[in-house]
Amino acid sequence: MWAFLVCVFFVSGADKLHADSKPEHAPPLHSEAAVLIDAETGQVLADKNGDRKMYPASITKIATGIMALEKGDSGEKVTVSKNAAEVDGTSVYLLEGEKIELHQLVEGMLINSGNDAGTAVAEHISGSEQAFSREMTEYLKEKTGITTTSFTNPHGLFSEDHYSTAEDMARITQYAMKNDDFREIVSTKELEWKSEGWDTQLRNHHQLLWDYEGATGVKNGYVSEAGFTLVTSAKRGNRELIAVVMKADSAQRAYEDSVQLLDFGFDKWKENVLEKGERFQSPDHSIFVTGENVTFLSPEQAELERTVSDEGMLNVTDQKGNHIFTAELVKERAKSGMEKKKRAEPSPKAEEERQSVWKTWAEYSSMVADTLYYHLQYIL
C-alpha cells in the first residue's frame, strides 16, 4: 500500500518545515520498498515502506564515497592490504602492496562497484572496515538526520547488522550529491582505468545514465539477501529528484520502478513558492511570516488552501482536505516602545519646518491680539 508523503526537512533560522499527505494515485511498483524525494528540499513525493529496515547491498558505497571524499585527502596514496585485495565480490583487481590515489579508489568503487576499493578506502581512513563503518554511521547521522541505518562494512556485502531504509538512503544521497566531486564521479559513464593489476575502460554499472533523460547518477547494488537495489538521480529544468528502490526481484524491475517514480515526480507535480516575508493571520489575529523563500511541490491538479493556527503552523491542504504541506512560521516581531519613539522623532528638516510654523503662528496671533485691543479701545 502506497503512502504519499510530502515531507520537507528544510530548516532555516526559526522556520521548520514539514508536511504529509496521502495521494489517490501513485505509480505501481514491484520493489518491496521505495521512496522519491526532491533533491533540493528533501520533500518526499512518494513512499512505499520507506521506513522499513532493508539490506542495501552496494548502494552502501554512496555512503562510503561521500565519507571518503569528506574525511580523506583525495590525492593521498593508499597502500592496498592483503585483506582489501582478497575481498569477495565485484573488483577492480587491486594488488596487495599496490599504491593508488584515494580519489581513484573512490572512482573504482562508485563506477565499477569495486569491493576491494571500498575496503582499501576504509582501512586507509579509519584503520579497519569495522572502525570506518561505525564512524561512517555516526558521521552521516549527524550530517543527514538518518535514524534507521547501521553500517558494518564499506561495500554492502551481506551482514545481519548492516541495514538501512529507502528514506535514509535517499537522505544520504541528497547530502552526497551536494559534493561536487561525488556528483562528478557518479555521473561519469566511462573512465580510463590504469592500475598495477588492471588496465581497462570502466563502464558505469548504472544503466539509466544512458537510458533516462536527465539522469545524473548514482549507484546500483545486489546481493541475494538484499535483492536488487538502485538509487537514481535525475534533473530536468530546475527540478532534481532522487529515487531509491530496494529489494526488487530483478535488475529490470528495479530500473522500471525507478523510471516510474522519476516520471511521476517530473510529470505530476508542480512548484509552489512562499515568498520571504509573506504574512499570515491566525484565528486570534496574530501575524506570522516566512523567514525566507520556501519552495514546495504539490500534485499538479490540486487546488491549495492555506490556514495558520494560533501557534503559527501553516497548513496547506488540497480541495479535499488532504494535507500537502506544513510550515512552522515566525511570529512577526512586535515594535518596542523605544522603536515607536524613535520613529516618532521628526527629522531635522521636519523640526525646522515645525519651528517655522509655530513662529509664524505666534507672530500672527500677536498681530490679531493688537488689532482687537485697538478696536476695543476705540469702542469704549
Image (cartoon, rainbow, N blue to C red):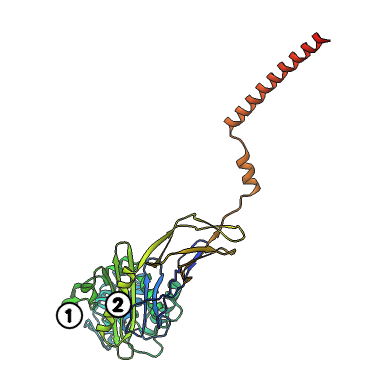
Residue 319 in picture, x, y percent from top left: 46, 67
Give the residue at the far front of this rendering. 320
Q: Quadrant of residue 26?
A: bottom left
Residue where numbered disc 2 is placed: 258
Element class at badge 2: helix
Residue where numbered disc 1 is placed: 198
Q: Compared with residue 226, is residue 77 higher up or lower down, i.e. above or below?
A: above
Q: Look at discs 2 and 1 and give the one toward the viewer.
A: 2
Q: Amino acid at mark 1?
A: Trp
Residue 206 in picture, x, y percent from top left: 24, 77
Q: Compared with residue 290, is residue 175 higher up or lower down, i.e. above or below?
A: below
* Residue 290 placement, left or right of 157: right
In the image shown, does 314 or 60 lie closer to the viewer?
Answer: 314
Element class at badge 1: loop
Q: Amino acid at mark 2?
A: Ser
Question: Is residue 378 visible to the viewer in this orientation of the structure?
Answer: yes
The answer for how far apart the CA atoms under marks 2 and 1 are is 32 Å
In the image shown, does 200 or 277 lie closer to the viewer?
Answer: 277
The residue under the point 46% across, 57% down is: 292
Question: Is residue 71 visible to the viewer in this orientation of the structure?
Answer: no
